[in-house]
Image (cartoon, helix red, strand yellow):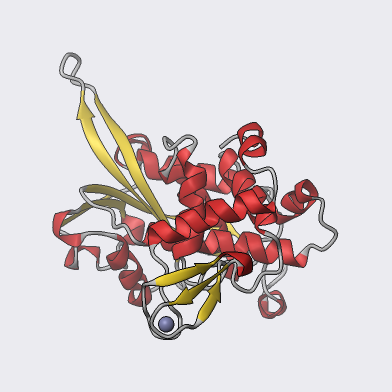
Amino acid sequence: MDIFSFGIEFTDEVSCRVHFKEQCDKEGVICNRCGGSQHYWLKNKWAYQCKSCEARQTLKSGTIMENSNLSFLLWYKTFCLMSATKKVFSSKEIQRQLGLKRYEPVWAMVHKIRDAMGQRDERYTLEGMIEADEGYFTVEPSAVERGKQKAGRGSKSKSNVMIMVESTILEDLETGAIDRQCRYFKAKVLENHKADGTDDTIKNAIDGETSIVFSDKSTSYLNIADYVDIHITEKSSERTTKETLKWVHIAIGNAKRDLQKFHKIKRKYLQLYLNEFIYKLNRRYFGDKIFDRLVIASITATGN
Ligand SMILES: [Zn+2]
């Protein structure tokens, strides 16, 4: 949804609430006391009342907005900003756009939305032919890391990220030229450069039964072959960059470029920024629908 259409549809707090309630009803409201799914709507209180146990819950209850004091209108404006462009907005910029004095609530809201985006994408696994490679993203070293770090060596301020993409080989019947078409992407921050943990991360991201994974030799410490149909590794070369791992390399490059403007991403928040980047990338053909999808993601995500 572009900002002009947003301004016409969502003129005030009530219009946002009405839209949000419609989406909640579509998804199904679950009582947080007894698990019941039948509710009365208490119009004057903007709350649901469970038909079995009479427990009441607000519209925000059970959604990522649950503990937020920000209005629905502010949340909706943020959904609009975060879905209107391919760029990843900084919380500072969103704070400026919303005209709010305090930074912390905006920061918390934006991170919750990024978390909801990640949870949404976790519902899907990649299948078919998959390119996989690791990218090293610059992060702000923690105080402990800074203490340990030797002068001139920045390796401690890199975070290891596994990027995967479904990539179908297309052959031009006339020329015989081979190209690859990409579909869905995933990006996972890896805890360390070891197989344990990392293997699980990839296992959960891929439908192993149907998948053929392409990677270069740098991922040889992983046991990918154990849980996918076929794992093909190739020594890094110009060919792997331009052909076999074309899309994964493009994604790593774009993600790095997009995240570069956040000068100090802490290691523990890197996944959240990647969530937003990947969420938008996976919905690059959604157009206007991405706004509604983001509202639904905010309802179905589990808060923390
Ligand atoms: Zn109940």
Which quadrant of the frame does ligand 1 lie within? bottom left
Which residue sits at x=41%, y=73%? 30
Which residue sits at x=29%, y=57%? 125
Q: Is residue 207 left or right of residue 262?
A: left
Residue 123 percent location from the top left of the image: 34, 61
Q: Please name whichever residue, 191 or 37, is drawn nearer the observer in this view of the structure.
A: 37
Q: Is residue 72 left or right of residue 52?
A: right
Quadrant position of residue 175: top left
The residue at the far right in this view is 101
Q: Please name whichever residue, 149 or 110, is drawn nearer the observer in this view of the structure.
A: 110
Which residue sits at x=38%, y=40%? 247
Residue 51 percent location from the top left of the image: 40, 78
Q: Is residue 229 left or right of residue 162?
A: left
Above or below for 243 versus 151 = above
Quadrant position of residue 282: top left
* Quadrant where the image shows the N terminus: top right
Count up the numbered dots.
0
One can see residue 156 in this view: no
Q: Please name whichever residue, 110 or 183, is drawn nearer the observer in this view of the structure.
A: 110
Q: Is residue 192 left or right of residue 98?
A: left
